[in-house]
Image (tube, grey):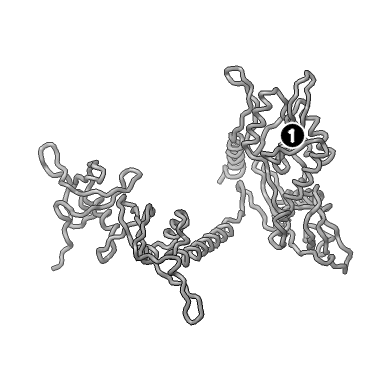
Amino acid sequence: MNQRPKFPQVPEGTPTIAKGNIISRGRVIERERDSDGNELGLEHHNPILDTRRYKIRFDDGDVTELTANVIAEAMYAQYDGDGNQHILLGSIIDHKRFKDVVSLSDQKDAKNGKANIRRSIAGWKLCCEWKDGSTSWKKLSILKESHPVRVAEYAVSQGIEGEPAFNWWVRPTIKKRNSIISSVKQRQSQDKRKTHKCGIRVPASVKEALAMDATNKNTLWADAIAKEMKNVRVAFNILPVGEDPPPGYQFVRCHMIFDVKIKDFRRKAILVAGGHMTNAPPTITYASVISRETVRIALLLAAFNDLEVKAADIMNAYITAPVEEKIWTILGPEFRADQGKKATIVRAIYGLKSSGASFRNHLADCMRHMGYTPCLADPDLWMKAEVREDGFKYYAYVLCYVDDVLSISHNAEEVLTRLDKYFRIKPGSLGDPDIYLRAKLKKMRLPNGVVAWALSPARYVHQSVRNVEEYISKNLSDQ
């Protein structure tokens, strides 16, 4: 009659056990007993149900108490069905080479008039730190087969990828790793396509948006489309029927993307171009934006010099700039009666590779015309020497983050009013700053009487929570 093996009185081996947030090796030293010397816990023929208690001493000298079933589970998890132990690699911490390593001069040889590369990984050992805290030296030949990516990353980080033992396989391994990661990210992005936001269904096309309006018996999405088209039609030069675009023009598809504004659940539609379909040189695609550090320093100077700070948003920023690329498209259903017609794109619209740079260059021309010059440390900070009414000399600043503009001057609002002559400022956006770079911007007085500006994301967080609570109370309270 076969019987299950009994758990020994004092289990042997060094199980790897979680000790707080650290994985550490421990060794069973003896049974745990009560004050009268009686052994604690009950024996069971099934180790998982064995509650006998033992003292465990870890490698760092710490002693703790564990039951037999916990020890058994830890030991079983470390071995496969044949009793072989598997230890997870933590990191590679060192390397060394021996005399039999192949040199660069010996790696290449010529046979039959052809250059050959000797592919050898002999003469190298790597020091591995395992998850259980132990370390050991392993041959490169072993680790290359078991952990090729980890070894390749280590070689690059240590600058030894050019050595003969690495130069013929490290770069292809890294390239393959990057390709796999890119494919996984692409699949994840496809799986994460938003179908709802704040509990509101977001359409994927104009047809779906209009169908949703019909179902909901409102015109929320239709109004958002109409508002967007009123602003962007100027970007399209519709060609006469039968006329083709000029030679050298690249074709792109345009489509609507939809969103729900978290602040007030307002529906928003944006017409974008498929910029991935064009070949645009890097010289016309790069566009910088102001850094947070520059914003903080500028606000510090505003507080020191007692200057006004005003903010404004440029309306349909990209549309105001001429396009740098030669492109054309076929108009979609959002153009209604003009659907199916060919048109060249003459203004920078969202989605084009060059739109950001086009708008920035257009804005830069206007800033120079107003007498401002870019800061050498941050070209999106524009400076102009000014003199206040009391004779104080200082520099006025205009900070540009795409279409969000911040003016720091003794007459900051007047500066933005002048800017409105070149770009349309969103109605109601010109005034004291409230939100900038998605953070709450507020002027405050410290306990010592010093005036300062503070940035905080608290408002965004509070508004998000409030919107969700309101939506739940209105639409899900009865469910």
| Total residue callouts | 1
Is 146 displayed left or right of 450 in the figure? left
User: Compared to 238, does 53 lie above or below?
Assistant: above
Residue furthest to the right in view is: 240
Q: Amino acid at mark 1?
A: Met
Residue furthest to the front in view is: 105
User: Compared to 402, does 140 lie above or below?
Assistant: below
The front one of 310 and 282 is 282
In which quadrant will I find the N terminus? bottom left
Q: Is residue 218 visible?
A: no
Instruction: Report x, y in % for residue 206.
Output: 73, 57
The front one of 365 and 18 is 365
The front one of 112 and 194 is 112
Q: Residue at x 82, y 60 (%)?
A: 344
Instruction: Report x, y in % for residue 277.
Output: 70, 63
The front one of 279 and 42 is 279
Q: Residue at x 48, y 82 (%)?
A: 112
Q: Quadrant of residue 416?
A: top right
User: Compared to 217, does 326 lie above or below?
Assistant: below
Q: Secondary structure at mark 1?
A: strand
Instruction: Report x, y in % for residue 137.
Output: 31, 57
Is 133 displayed left or right of 415 in the figure? left
Is 346 displayed left or right of 36 in the figure? right
Q: Quadrant of residue 303?
A: top right
User: Compared to 96, does 460 lie above or below?
Assistant: above
Q: Is residue 436 visible?
A: yes
Q: Residue at x 69, y 23 (%)?
A: 305
Is 383 displayed left or right of 67 in the figure? right
- Crowding near pointer 1: few (<14 within 10 Å), some, many (20+)? many
Instruction: Report x, y in % for residue 328.
Output: 79, 62
Q: Which residue is mark 1?
A: 383
